[in-house]
Amino acid sequence: MSKLFLAIGECMVEMAPTAEGTYAMGFAGDTLNTAWYARKCLPGDWSVGYYTAVGTDKVSGEMLDFLKGSNIETDAVRKLDDRTVGLYLIQLKDGERSFAYWRSQSAARLLAADVARLDEAVSSAGLIYFSGITIAILSPEDRKTFLSSLRRARDAGAKVAFDPNLRPRLWEDAETMRKSVTEAAGLCDLVMPSFEDELAHFGDETPAVSADRYLAAGAKMVVVKNGPEDVICASAGERQTFQPDPVRDIVDTTAAGDSFNAAFLSEYLTGGEITASVSAAARLAGKVIRHRGALVDCLQSR
Protein backbone atom coordinates (compact mmCIF):
# COMPACT_ATOMS: atom_id res chain seq x y z
CA MET A 1 0.00 0.00 0.00
CA SER A 2 1.29 3.44 -0.95
CA LYS A 3 1.92 5.63 2.08
CA LEU A 4 0.31 8.75 0.60
CA PHE A 5 -2.78 10.21 2.27
CA LEU A 6 -4.37 12.34 -0.47
CA ALA A 7 -7.22 14.69 0.42
CA ILE A 8 -9.29 16.25 -2.38
CA GLY A 9 -11.52 19.28 -2.12
CA GLU A 10 -11.64 23.02 -1.63
CA CYS A 11 -9.23 24.96 0.55
CA MET A 12 -10.59 28.45 1.32
CA VAL A 13 -9.57 31.68 2.98
CA GLU A 14 -10.95 31.52 6.53
CA MET A 15 -11.95 34.58 8.53
CA ALA A 16 -12.24 33.36 12.13
CA PRO A 17 -13.42 35.41 15.14
CA THR A 18 -10.83 36.19 17.80
CA ALA A 19 -11.30 36.64 21.54
CA GLU A 20 -10.88 40.41 21.00
CA GLY A 21 -13.88 40.60 18.68
CA THR A 22 -11.86 40.96 15.47
CA TYR A 23 -11.22 38.41 12.72
CA ALA A 24 -8.03 36.53 11.88
CA MET A 25 -7.29 35.36 8.34
CA GLY A 26 -6.17 31.82 7.70
CA PHE A 27 -6.74 28.94 5.31
CA ALA A 28 -9.08 26.01 5.93
CA GLY A 29 -11.87 23.86 4.49
CA ASP A 30 -13.27 20.49 5.47
CA THR A 31 -10.92 18.18 3.54
CA LEU A 32 -7.95 20.50 4.06
CA ASN A 33 -8.62 20.46 7.80
CA THR A 34 -8.51 16.67 7.77
CA ALA A 35 -5.29 16.65 5.73
CA TRP A 36 -3.69 19.15 8.11
CA TYR A 37 -4.56 17.08 11.18
CA ALA A 38 -3.58 13.86 9.41
CA ARG A 39 -0.12 15.30 8.87
CA LYS A 40 0.07 15.89 12.63
CA CYS A 41 -1.10 12.35 13.42
CA LEU A 42 0.61 10.17 10.81
CA PRO A 43 4.19 8.93 11.25
CA GLY A 44 6.97 10.40 9.16
CA ASP A 45 7.05 7.59 6.62
CA TRP A 46 3.62 8.71 5.42
CA SER A 47 3.15 11.65 3.05
CA VAL A 48 0.07 13.87 3.03
CA GLY A 49 -0.99 15.57 -0.19
CA TYR A 50 -3.81 17.87 -1.23
CA TYR A 51 -5.46 17.99 -4.64
CA THR A 52 -7.49 21.03 -5.65
CA ALA A 53 -7.41 23.97 -8.07
CA VAL A 54 -6.36 27.52 -7.24
CA GLY A 55 -5.77 30.76 -9.09
CA THR A 56 -2.49 32.41 -10.00
CA ASP A 57 -3.14 35.50 -7.86
CA LYS A 58 -1.37 36.50 -4.65
CA VAL A 59 -3.82 34.92 -2.20
CA SER A 60 -3.69 31.61 -4.11
CA GLY A 61 0.10 31.69 -3.84
CA GLU A 62 -0.15 32.39 -0.12
CA MET A 63 -2.48 29.41 0.24
CA LEU A 64 -0.01 27.10 -1.50
CA ASP A 65 2.78 28.45 0.69
CA PHE A 66 0.68 27.68 3.76
CA LEU A 67 0.09 24.10 2.59
CA LYS A 68 3.76 23.56 1.82
CA GLY A 69 4.71 25.07 5.18
CA SER A 70 2.39 22.53 6.80
CA ASN A 71 4.29 19.68 5.07
CA ILE A 72 1.37 18.99 2.76
CA GLU A 73 2.34 18.14 -0.81
CA THR A 74 0.85 20.41 -3.51
CA ASP A 75 2.66 19.34 -6.70
CA ALA A 76 -0.54 18.14 -8.37
CA VAL A 77 -2.63 21.26 -7.65
CA ARG A 78 -4.14 22.90 -10.77
CA LYS A 79 -3.45 26.62 -11.31
CA LEU A 80 -6.00 28.60 -13.32
CA ASP A 81 -5.38 32.14 -14.57
CA ASP A 82 -9.03 33.21 -14.56
CA ARG A 83 -10.02 31.97 -11.08
CA THR A 84 -9.16 32.55 -7.44
CA VAL A 85 -9.91 30.84 -4.11
CA GLY A 86 -13.11 30.99 -2.08
CA LEU A 87 -13.58 32.69 1.29
CA TYR A 88 -15.74 31.96 4.32
CA LEU A 89 -16.43 33.76 7.58
CA ILE A 90 -17.18 31.97 10.86
CA GLN A 91 -19.89 33.31 13.17
CA LEU A 92 -20.07 31.88 16.71
CA LYS A 93 -22.89 31.64 19.24
CA ASP A 94 -22.49 29.58 22.44
CA GLY A 95 -19.68 27.55 20.85
CA GLU A 96 -21.74 26.62 17.78
CA ARG A 97 -20.75 28.02 14.41
CA SER A 98 -22.46 29.25 11.29
CA PHE A 99 -20.81 30.35 8.07
CA ALA A 100 -21.07 32.97 5.35
CA TYR A 101 -19.43 32.01 2.03
CA TRP A 102 -18.01 33.75 -1.04
CA ARG A 103 -17.03 31.04 -3.52
CA SER A 104 -18.72 31.64 -6.90
CA GLN A 105 -15.34 32.08 -8.66
CA SER A 106 -13.55 29.39 -6.70
CA ALA A 107 -11.00 27.57 -8.86
CA ALA A 108 -11.71 24.40 -6.86
CA ARG A 109 -15.00 24.04 -8.74
CA LEU A 110 -12.85 22.93 -11.70
CA LEU A 111 -10.65 20.44 -9.85
CA ALA A 112 -12.04 17.52 -11.88
CA ALA A 113 -12.17 19.28 -15.27
CA ASP A 114 -8.77 17.88 -16.29
CA VAL A 115 -9.32 14.14 -16.04
CA ALA A 116 -5.76 13.19 -16.95
CA ARG A 117 -4.36 15.37 -14.19
CA LEU A 118 -6.90 14.02 -11.68
CA ASP A 119 -6.14 10.42 -12.61
CA GLU A 120 -2.43 11.05 -12.21
CA ALA A 121 -2.95 12.63 -8.79
CA VAL A 122 -5.01 9.76 -7.38
CA SER A 123 -2.95 6.99 -8.97
CA SER A 124 -0.14 7.31 -6.43
CA ALA A 125 -2.34 7.48 -3.31
CA GLY A 126 -2.75 4.77 -0.73
CA LEU A 127 -5.74 6.52 0.86
CA ILE A 128 -7.95 9.01 -0.99
CA TYR A 129 -10.14 11.20 1.21
CA PHE A 130 -12.96 13.45 -0.02
CA SER A 131 -16.25 14.87 1.20
CA GLY A 132 -19.75 15.77 0.15
CA ILE A 133 -18.52 19.32 -0.35
CA THR A 134 -15.87 18.06 -2.78
CA ILE A 135 -18.55 16.67 -5.09
CA ALA A 136 -21.16 19.36 -4.35
CA ILE A 137 -19.05 22.18 -5.82
CA LEU A 138 -18.51 20.30 -9.12
CA SER A 139 -20.70 20.50 -12.20
CA PRO A 140 -22.78 17.36 -12.85
CA GLU A 141 -20.39 16.36 -15.66
CA ASP A 142 -17.28 16.89 -13.53
CA ARG A 143 -18.93 15.01 -10.68
CA LYS A 144 -19.24 11.95 -12.91
CA THR A 145 -15.62 12.38 -14.00
CA PHE A 146 -14.48 12.59 -10.39
CA LEU A 147 -16.32 9.45 -9.28
CA SER A 148 -15.07 7.53 -12.32
CA SER A 149 -11.51 8.51 -11.42
CA LEU A 150 -12.06 7.23 -7.88
CA ARG A 151 -13.34 3.92 -9.26
CA ARG A 152 -10.20 3.48 -11.35
CA ALA A 153 -7.93 4.34 -8.43
CA ARG A 154 -9.76 1.95 -6.15
CA ASP A 155 -9.63 -0.83 -8.75
CA ALA A 156 -5.87 -0.26 -8.83
CA GLY A 157 -5.58 -0.78 -5.07
CA ALA A 158 -6.21 2.59 -3.38
CA LYS A 159 -8.46 2.84 -0.33
CA VAL A 160 -11.15 5.54 -0.37
CA ALA A 161 -12.67 7.38 2.62
CA PHE A 162 -15.61 9.79 2.48
CA ASP A 163 -17.36 12.20 4.83
CA PRO A 164 -20.81 12.99 3.34
CA ASN A 165 -20.77 16.46 5.01
CA LEU A 166 -24.25 17.32 3.73
CA ARG A 167 -24.60 21.00 2.74
CA PRO A 168 -27.86 21.46 0.77
CA ARG A 169 -27.11 25.05 -0.25
CA LEU A 170 -24.24 23.81 -2.43
CA TRP A 171 -26.40 21.38 -4.41
CA GLU A 172 -28.83 21.78 -7.29
CA ASP A 173 -31.57 20.28 -5.11
CA ALA A 174 -31.95 17.96 -2.12
CA GLU A 175 -32.70 14.86 -4.19
CA THR A 176 -29.55 15.30 -6.29
CA MET A 177 -27.56 15.66 -3.07
CA ARG A 178 -28.96 12.45 -1.61
CA LYS A 179 -28.47 10.45 -4.82
CA SER A 180 -24.94 11.74 -5.41
CA VAL A 181 -23.81 11.16 -1.82
CA THR A 182 -25.26 7.64 -1.87
CA GLU A 183 -23.49 6.86 -5.14
CA ALA A 184 -20.21 8.21 -3.79
CA ALA A 185 -20.54 6.19 -0.58
CA GLY A 186 -20.92 3.02 -2.61
CA LEU A 187 -17.38 3.52 -3.95
CA CYS A 188 -15.80 3.76 -0.52
CA ASP A 189 -13.96 1.56 1.91
CA LEU A 190 -14.89 3.89 4.76
CA VAL A 191 -17.78 6.37 5.11
CA MET A 192 -17.75 8.79 8.07
CA PRO A 193 -21.08 10.64 8.37
CA SER A 194 -22.29 12.94 11.16
CA PHE A 195 -25.67 11.79 12.46
CA GLU A 196 -26.96 15.36 12.81
CA ASP A 197 -26.68 15.76 9.03
CA GLU A 198 -28.14 12.34 8.28
CA LEU A 199 -31.15 13.00 10.52
CA ALA A 200 -31.80 16.39 8.93
CA HIS A 201 -31.37 15.43 5.28
CA PHE A 202 -32.04 11.68 5.03
CA GLY A 203 -34.52 11.47 7.90
CA ASP A 204 -32.63 8.68 9.68
CA GLU A 205 -34.19 7.97 13.06
CA THR A 206 -31.01 6.63 14.68
CA PRO A 207 -27.28 6.44 13.92
CA ALA A 208 -27.74 2.70 13.32
CA VAL A 209 -30.12 3.51 10.47
CA SER A 210 -27.48 5.77 8.92
CA ALA A 211 -24.87 3.03 9.19
CA ASP A 212 -27.18 0.45 7.63
CA ARG A 213 -28.13 2.76 4.75
CA TYR A 214 -24.52 3.43 3.78
CA LEU A 215 -23.60 -0.25 4.09
CA ALA A 216 -26.52 -1.08 1.81
CA ALA A 217 -25.20 1.46 -0.69
CA GLY A 218 -21.93 -0.47 -0.88
CA ALA A 219 -19.65 1.08 1.76
CA LYS A 220 -17.33 -1.45 3.40
CA MET A 221 -17.25 0.26 6.80
CA VAL A 222 -19.25 3.13 8.31
CA VAL A 223 -18.26 5.28 11.29
CA VAL A 224 -21.17 7.44 12.46
CA LYS A 225 -20.18 10.47 14.52
CA ASN A 226 -22.79 11.90 16.86
CA GLY A 227 -21.30 14.79 18.83
CA PRO A 228 -20.99 13.80 22.50
CA GLU A 229 -23.12 10.69 21.99
CA ASP A 230 -22.07 7.18 21.00
CA VAL A 231 -19.91 6.57 17.93
CA ILE A 232 -21.05 3.59 15.86
CA CYS A 233 -18.57 1.60 13.75
CA ALA A 234 -20.25 -0.90 11.46
CA SER A 235 -19.27 -3.30 8.70
CA ALA A 236 -21.02 -6.26 7.13
CA GLY A 237 -19.88 -8.64 9.85
CA GLU A 238 -19.40 -6.46 12.91
CA ARG A 239 -20.91 -3.53 14.82
CA GLN A 240 -19.34 -1.70 17.77
CA THR A 241 -20.46 1.26 19.88
CA PHE A 242 -18.13 3.66 21.69
CA GLN A 243 -18.92 6.43 24.19
CA PRO A 244 -16.51 9.40 23.91
CA ASP A 245 -15.30 11.07 27.08
CA PRO A 246 -17.27 14.26 27.87
CA VAL A 247 -15.73 17.58 26.83
CA ARG A 248 -16.19 20.71 28.93
CA ASP A 249 -15.45 24.35 28.15
CA ILE A 250 -16.33 24.04 24.46
CA VAL A 251 -15.29 27.20 22.59
CA ASP A 252 -15.74 26.47 18.88
CA THR A 253 -16.92 23.25 17.22
CA THR A 254 -15.38 24.15 13.85
CA ALA A 255 -13.45 21.14 12.46
CA ALA A 256 -14.67 18.76 15.16
CA GLY A 257 -15.64 16.16 12.57
CA ASP A 258 -12.67 16.92 10.32
CA SER A 259 -10.16 16.36 13.12
CA PHE A 260 -12.02 13.23 14.28
CA ASN A 261 -11.75 11.82 10.76
CA ALA A 262 -8.03 12.63 10.56
CA ALA A 263 -7.13 10.94 13.81
CA PHE A 264 -9.34 7.91 13.13
CA LEU A 265 -7.92 7.37 9.65
CA SER A 266 -4.33 7.93 10.79
CA GLU A 267 -4.61 5.39 13.59
CA TYR A 268 -6.54 2.91 11.46
CA LEU A 269 -4.07 3.11 8.56
CA THR A 270 -1.10 2.47 10.82
CA GLY A 271 -2.61 0.20 13.47
CA GLY A 272 -5.77 -1.29 11.99
CA GLU A 273 -7.57 -1.44 15.34
CA ILE A 274 -11.01 0.19 15.60
CA THR A 275 -11.10 0.82 19.36
CA ALA A 276 -7.76 2.65 19.29
CA SER A 277 -8.86 4.58 16.20
CA VAL A 278 -12.06 5.85 17.82
CA SER A 279 -10.20 6.72 21.02
CA ALA A 280 -7.59 8.75 19.12
CA ALA A 281 -10.30 10.46 17.07
CA ALA A 282 -12.44 11.46 20.04
CA ARG A 283 -9.40 12.65 21.96
CA LEU A 284 -8.22 14.96 19.16
CA ALA A 285 -11.69 16.33 18.40
CA GLY A 286 -12.14 17.03 22.11
CA LYS A 287 -8.98 19.14 22.12
CA VAL A 288 -9.85 21.00 18.93
CA ILE A 289 -13.28 22.19 20.08
CA ARG A 290 -11.77 23.84 23.15
CA HIS A 291 -10.04 26.37 20.87
CA ARG A 292 -11.06 28.90 18.23
CA GLY A 293 -10.77 28.24 14.51
CA ALA A 294 -10.47 25.18 12.31
CA LEU A 295 -6.75 24.43 12.68
CA VAL A 296 -5.49 24.11 16.24
CA ASP A 297 -1.89 23.15 16.87
CA CYS A 298 -2.62 20.87 19.81
CA LEU A 299 -0.44 18.00 18.69
CA GLN A 300 3.28 17.77 18.02
CA SER A 301 4.08 17.41 14.31
CA ARG A 302 5.77 14.15 13.39
Image: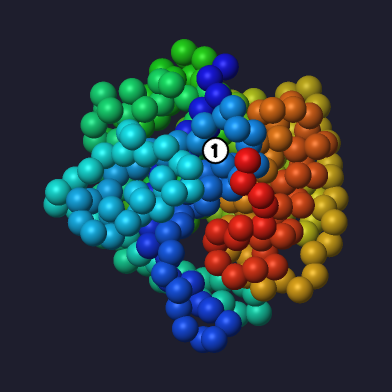
- The residue under the point 42% across, 59% down is 27
Q: Position of residue 15 (x, y in %)?
A: 43, 71
In-image side of 66 versus 258 (left or right): left
Compared to residue 240, the image places residue 253 above or below, namely below
Q: How many marks?
A: 1
Looking at this view, name the residue that lies furthest to the top.
Answer: 156
Q: Position of residue 94 (x, y in %)?
A: 65, 79
Q: Position of residue 91 (x, y in %)?
A: 51, 76
- The residue under the point 80% across, 70% down is 248
Q: How is the rendered protein coloured? A: rainbow
Q: Position of residue 65 (x, y in %)?
A: 36, 51
In-image side of 267 versus 114 (left or right): right
Looking at this view, name the residue that lies furthest to the left.
Answer: 82
Of residues 140 and 244, which is closer to you in this image?
A: 244
Of residues 109 and 187, which is closer to you in this image?
A: 109
SS of the residue at dot 1? strand
- The residue under the point 74% across, 59% down is 286
In-image side of 63 versus 21 (left or right): left
Amino acid bearing label 1: Phe
Residue matched to label 1: 162
In-image side of 54 versus 150 (left or right): left
- The residue under the point 69% across, 40% down is 264
Q: What quarter of the picture does the C terminus occupy? A: top right
Confirm whether residue 95 shows in the render.
yes
Of residues 219 and 285, which is closer to you in this image?
A: 285
Q: Residues within 10 Å of mark 1 (few under 14, many from 20)?
A: many
Confirm whether residue 176 shows in the render.
no
Residue 221, quarter of the rendered image:
top right
Q: What quarter of the picture does the N terminus occupy? A: top right
